[in-house]
Amino acid sequence: MSFEPRSPDFEATVRATFAGQAFMQLIGADISRLVPGELDLICARRPDLTQQHGYFHAGVTSAIADSAAGLAALTLFDSGSGVLTTEYKINLVAPGDGDQLIARGWVIRPGRTLTVCKSDVFANNDSCETLIATGLFTMMQLAATSH
Amino acid sequence: MSFEPRSPDFEATVRATFAGQAFMQLIGADISRLVPGELDLICARRPDLTQQHGYFHAGVTSAIADSAAGLAALTLFDSGSGVLTTEYKINLVAPGDGDQLIARGWVIRPGRTLTVCKSDVFANNDSCETLIATGLFTMMQLAATSH
Amino acid sequence: MSFEPRSPDFEATVRATFAGQAFMQLIGADISRLVPGELDLICARRPDLTQQHGYFHAGVTSAIADSAAGLAALTLFDSGSGVLTTEYKINLVAPGDGDQLIARGWVIRPGRTLTVCKSDVFANNDSCETLIATGLFTMMQLAATSH
Amino acid sequence: MSFEPRSPDFEATVRATFAGQAFMQLIGADISRLVPGELDLICARRPDLTQQHGYFHAGVTSAIADSAAGLAALTLFDSGSGVLTTEYKINLVAPGDGDQLIARGWVIRPGRTLTVCKSDVFANNDSCETLIATGLFTMMQLAATSH
């Protein structure tokens, strides 16, 4: 699907929003791809991002899945508006075992009020990419005045 | 509902599992209550846990909701077994605006393979507690040999 | 929690909306309780509502859970508005084994645009009531002109 | 993705399971496609399948989405085993406005105990197909002796 952004500044808005998410910096996430309706985040393995078996903690997996989906939605919003996750569901289908996670978020249904997105998270190990999580998200556009 | 733990060491197991989750230490979460089938986690506000509007990042809210639910499930598992989140859904119903978050996880349906849990997250501000998120989780018991 | 309905006609609106859902008649569902923010639906066992093991089909369980939640939301909406389920998640925690199902829907977070609800479904067998499903729903208010 | 069924009789098992779901007959659903890991169900519009605005009731949409996903999972299960939906989440992204619904279910992660599936539902109107719902499902394999 191909989307036409409504805001000419969508890329700057998305990057500024991401830069304002201190928590994304805490976990070391970064934008690796940004096009209208799609956004990827990467996050390198660190010992302090793990759970009791040494894999990426599901909290990290979910956080980048959510942020990738929300920022993908934001690429299509009106100029000056913000984005809010109203709810999501995620299935964790394999251990987060890898040197790096990549979360690929994309819009499946843009809307005036609600935008539905998906996000898949992959773990990279050497040259191999494994699907570790898949999620479904409902994002809300916040009017310029309300955030 | 009142639950009878199957493992005499359930409290030690839960505390050791939590201590092994480096990511929980990174965000400063702590166990504030632990009884069979129920577990609360608290997390104090820090600038590096926020999103672009200064509230707790949904990634933090979700991570403690998930960990509280998983550890609540673990209190009821067989001795020596571990816990895995297979999936969850969370509704973020209000901004994470407060000095501290508290995630209250509890088991609603224990099972041989799958245990269904809920988790509510509240933001504390002065003496006021506001519900900011509510989630529904499916946890899996991992046999002693498989983790 | 206690709610103040915004529409003086909320009960008539909810009953008319339910009466307009031909599918609820097909499965024989009925409103058994209606107060602001809460609504129960009952559905008696019939052979044509079952799945391959003779239990209530999950489609029936989910449908009454969803309708109970949506109608519970509608009790709190503005006069003349309608209700739409935007999304939900349901855990089916036990077989739908009973003479009757009862779905209890209630509002946990009313909102201008989105209202978050829960719904629990119980199977009645003789005098025993068993929780068979629990769900989390996001409902949207439709303005009078848009439906 | 291409899947190798473990049961030589997978097609007969799936068709027999579907035939045993009386509720699927009540709503007039039918299998229109069946290959390993994928299954489509169609359901023609009838006045008694609608909600208050004349569209397909979300209960019908969800029921065929769930059954398509569950039967897709069943194509990959061991001979003699059954399938159970443990939980699902669905986003209803557009009104169920059409002459026919088609639910396309497929497996994204097969497993020994749990199999994760997706299902998209489309409404057909003349030659046009519109996505009206998308869901994420966790299916469980039931051993031959337990169902």
Image: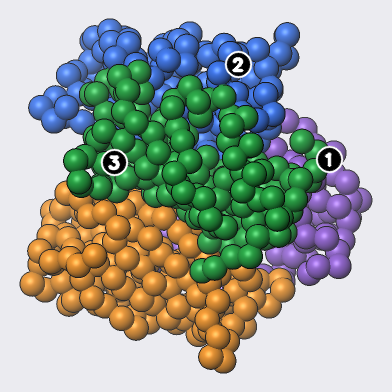
Chain colours: A blue, B green, C orange, D purple
**Do callouts 1 and 2 point to residues on the same chain?**
no
- B26 sits to left or right of B9: left
Q: Can you see residue B35?
A: yes
Which residue is labeled 3 in the image?
B123
Q: Residue at x 53, y 91 (%)?
A: C127
**Residue C45 drawn above or below residue C9:** below
- D109 sits to left or right of C90: right
Q: Position of residue C120 (x, y in %)?
A: 45, 67
- Which of C6/A97 is in front? A97
Q: CA distance from mark 3 to mark 1?
A: 39 Å
- Per the image, label 1 sits on a secondary structure element best described as helix
Identified by mark 3, the residue type is Ala
Q: CA distance from mark 1 to mark 2?
A: 24 Å
Q: Residues within 10 Å of mark 2 (few under 14, many from 20)?
A: few
Identified by mark 1, the residue type is Thr
In contact (CB < 8 Å): disc 1 and disc 2: no
Q: Residues within 10 Å of mark 3 (few under 14, many from 20)?
A: many
Identified by mark 2, the residue type is Pro
- Per the image, label 3 sits on a secondary structure element best described as strand
- B18 sits to left or right of D140: left
- Per the image, label 2 sits on a secondary structure element best described as helix
Which residue is labeled 1 in the image?
B145
Tell which subunit mark 1 falls on: B
